[in-house]
Image (spheres, rainbow, N blue to C red):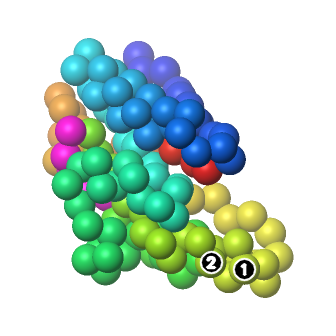
Amino acid sequence: MEGKAKVIAFANQKGGVAKTTTTLNLGVALAERGKRVLTVDLDPQSNLTMSQGLDPEELDRSMFDVLVHKVPIEEIIVSREVDLAVSSIDLAGAELAMSSIRRERPVRLRWPASRMTGTSRPRSVSTATPMLMYCL
């Protein structure tokens, strides 16, 4: 029987406190132990995204589009050392863009079975997937 997903958020407004390093290292360590891990880069500087060899300026969509334009999060996930919901500089304007939204909208995720080791059907993130969120 699988437990519920765990969400671990690393947040601090101060730079240089190892948010990116901690997120990546913990994510990789959990993945090496057989856990399904999704890292979510919510930093407009996109350091976690760049740490996976991606250029944020070349991305068509990012977490900005998930939060503001209601793009399904599955469409911005890339697989590298761990699965990553990518970020871009557009996130710097997300607060202003979202100020007209009246209430919170949950981000629902159906992680494709192809991204899950040892399973052949999609499962909801709320029941199957540890998630590491890297925030400002």
Q: Secondary structure at mark 2?
A: helix
Whether residue 10 is visible here, answered yes or no, is: yes
x and y percentages locating residue 50 in the rendered image = 30, 55
Please tell me whether residue 79 belongs to the stretch shown in magenta: yes
Looking at the figure, which quarter contains the N terminus?
top left
Residue neighbourhood size for the residue with mark 2, other residues' Cα within 10 Å, grouped as few (<14), some (14–19), many (≥20): few
Amino acid type for the residue under numbered disc 2: Gly
Point 68% across, 65% down: residue: 105
The secondary element bearing badge 1 is classed as helix
Q: Is residue 115 above or below residue 37?
A: below
Query: Residue 130, percent across and down?
Result: 44, 32
Locate residue 15, reporting x and y percent: 58, 45
Q: Is residue 52 left or right of residue 84?
A: left
- The residue located at (49%, 33%) in the rendering is 18
In the picture, the disc for residue 96 is 1
Q: Which residue is mark 2?
A: 93
The residue positioned 22% from the left and 20% from the top of the image is 32
**Magenta span:** 77-81
Please determine whether, in this image, residue 55 is positioned above or below residue 2: below
